[in-house]
Amino acid sequence: MRVLLDDPALVDDLCAHFRRSGFTADPDGGRIVELSLTVAPSREQERNEILVHLQLWRILNPGGVAKELPR
């Protein structure tokens, strides 16, 4: 899943948050992060896991705006 952040200064924090939980998180341009969870049993489960952790990140970073980008 690709996520667009409103603030490029938050990219490293978002990547670190996901990596601590076993996700792959790679910056993909100034404000975009590519997230994946290769151990998820399905693409749907992978997406659900990412969305849960993205919501947690938003709670921990109330000023940060992160949006899922369409594929």
Image (cartoon, rainbow, N blue to C red):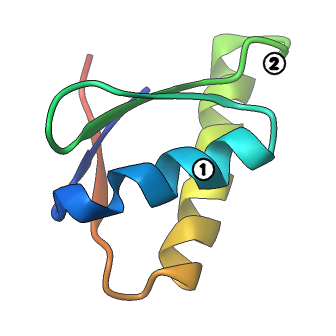
Q: Which residue is mark 2?
A: 40
Residue lying at 74% horizontally and 27% vertically, measured from the top left? 45
Label 1, secondary structure: give it: helix
Query: How crowded is the residue under tag 1: few (<14 C-alpha within 10 Å), some, or many (20+)?
Result: some
Label 2, secondary structure: give it: loop
Q: Is residue 26 above or below residue 50?
A: above
Residue 21, x across and y down, in percent? 80, 45
Q: Which mark is residue 16?
A: 1
Which quadrant of the figure contains the C terminus?
A: top left
Residue 23, x across and y down, in percent? 70, 31
Q: Which mark is residue 58?
A: none
Instruction: Name the residue type under label 1.
Output: Ala
Residue 54, x across and y down, in percent? 54, 56
Instruction: Name the residue type under label 2.
Output: Ala
Residue 44, x across and y down, in percent? 65, 22
Outermost bottom residue: 62
Asked if residue 36 lies left or right of residue 6, the reply is right
Please tell me which of labels 1 and 2 falls first in the chain.
Answer: 1
Asked if residue 1 lies left or right of residue 55, the reply is left
Q: For residue 56, what is the image quadrant?
A: bottom right
